[in-house]
Image: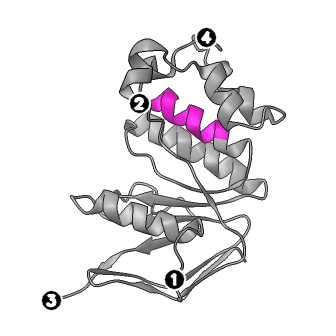
Amino acid sequence: MLIKNKGIKTDTFYIPPFDLNVGEIIVLHLFNGQHFYETEMFLKDIFIGKTKDTNVVLTQNLTFVEHFIEPKIRRLFYPLTVGEYLNKNANLNSPYASKIYETEWINKKTKVNTLPGNPRRLLSLFATLSKTKNIVFDVAGQDPKGAEKTYELVKEVVNNGGSAILLDCFEDMKNDCTKYVELQWNKK
């Protein structure tokens, strides 16, 4: 068991209990709306071990698949390339570190800020998977096809001994996961 959640309660919501074990993918449905990002970041911090919660026991911290953000000054004068990004953020000995190059038009000199949402998200995912197989991720900024591809890639990793929590605002993966957990709003 990697995570034992006995129930996360705040003033505004409640996350019912669940356990995350190796070989499982949990979809945590946070609903769509203005609260999504704040709720997602709050939960991410708990699952990666940054924030302690008395009702959550972590035997191993997960890693969040970060979104690529480049400072404006860098983007204008010295944009980061895919090769530089991987050198900085990936384990280059892992096969995942070079998986982004399977997209024929992406190479080491491709500027990351020129990548559309789906390949940019895959770049972050591959860099993270090159270091760990236990992740927390989202599909924000991706179109439905890209989100589906990301989810399928994560499922492969989970089937090969990984584990994952998808923080999502849609129910698309409800019937295609090990466990589905819905956020419950506190009644006023």
Q: Report the mark closest to the observer, 4 or 2.
A: 2
Q: Which amino acid does label 2 sit on?
A: Pro
Label 4 neighbour load within 10 Å: few <14, some 14-19, many 20+: few
Q: What residue type is labelled 4?
A: Lys
Mark 4 or 2, nearer chain start: 2
Residue underneath mark 2: 71
- The secondary element bearing badge 3 is classed as loop
Residue underneath mark 3: 188
Residue underneath mark 4: 109
Q: Which amino acid does label 3 sit on?
A: Lys
Q: Is residue 48 visible to the viewer in this orientation of the structure? A: yes
- The residue at the point 61 percent across, 18 percent down is 103
Mark 4 or 1, nearer chain start: 1
Q: Nearer the viewer, residue 86 or 142?
A: 86
Residue underneath mark 1: 53
Q: Name the chief secondary structure element in magenta.
A: helix
- The residue at the point 48 percent across, 70 percent down is 180
